[in-house]
Amino acid sequence: MLQPLVHVHGWPLQNTPATGRIAATSPCGRIEVAAEIAVFHLWRITVRTHPDDVEPRWWATFSKETPAEIVNALVQALAADRHVAPEEIVAEWPGHPPAGWHPLLKAGWAASELTALLLQDQGGTSSIIGAPAGPATTVVDGVRFTSPDGTASLTHRPKPDSEFGEAMGPWMIEVEFGPTWQDQWNATLSAATPMRYLNMLTSAVVDPAPVIRTTSQISDATRTAAATRPAPPPPRNPLTHVEAEFARTDPRHPTQGHPHR
């Protein structure tokens, strides 16, 4: 995951064995891609407006079992944009969330409204769970998109990050196609995530291109649902392997190519 950033883009690598954390930081100091071995969300991407900012402008996390191709779609786009469109990585929230989920609709995902019960009391209106004790109103709280086979969903609730608990956020992708942890993964993105990156991420989610996996990485549920065929042997030259991995994870940037190396 981090090899293309280090060997192709020249990002410094920080390894902290005591905490099980490995991170690559862009030379400008605004983007960090970290692998946090000891926590549920293995991959954490943070983007800052200025390198010295305490709080990131936006962030994204991915659980351990998230396919590498999904995470790389976002990582490689950020690495490319740092060179060709640096203002895009911290673009203001554009107010057009349909741009983020358009690839899902194009792939046949079904949209549905998320609702919540609001209870009116003397202190104002507040969200509640369960049967209301007083007058209540059902309101639209967000939107959910579900894949045709029902195994994957994207939910969007337009609220500040502070209103969500641990491992939750305004944008969430959840996938469950089997009974084991190997068959489940999720991604969470903050409210300020630019729509262009959400679009790239959802495009990667519905990309039908084949991926390379070892036999041990294929669960029983995957083996039943997916078509498989033998993969070609990996290249022997380590540098060639890095270049090959970089090319394989290229998210096909919609406006600009990757920088010259």
Image (tube, rainbow, N blue to C red):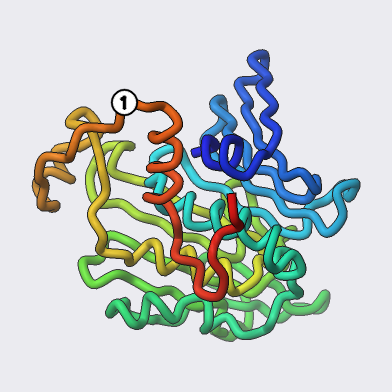
Q: Secondary structure at mark 1?
A: loop
In the image, residue 18 sits, relative to residue 187, either above or below, namely above
Residue 56 point in image, percent of width and height: 78, 53
Tell me, yes or no, if residue 41 can be seen here: no
In the image, residue 18 sits, relative to residue 250, either above or below, namely above
Q: Quadrant of residue 149?
A: bottom left
Q: Which residue is mark 1?
A: 236
Q: Looking at the image, which residue is at 85% across and 48% down?
A: 51
Residue 228 point in image, percent of width and height: 11, 47
In the figure, is residue 128 to the left or right of 204? right
In the figure, is residue 151 to the left or right of 231? right
In the displayed orientation, state which residue is furthest to the right: 52
Residue 121 point in image, percent of width and height: 75, 78
Q: Quadrant of residue 212?
A: top left
Q: Quadrant of residue 157?
A: bottom right
In the displayed orientation, state which residue is furthest to the top: 18
Q: Amino acid at mark 1?
A: Arg
Tell me, yes or no, if residue 36 can be seen here: yes
Residue 14 point in image, percent of width and height: 69, 26
Q: Nearer the viewer, residue 71 or 219?
A: 71
Q: Nearer the viewer, residue 201 or 182?
A: 201
Q: Nearer the viewer, residue 86 or 64?
A: 86
Q: Nearer the viewer, residue 119 or 143?
A: 143
Q: Looking at the image, which residue is at 83% across and 59% down?
A: 49
Q: Looking at the image, which residue is at 51% across and 46% down?
A: 62
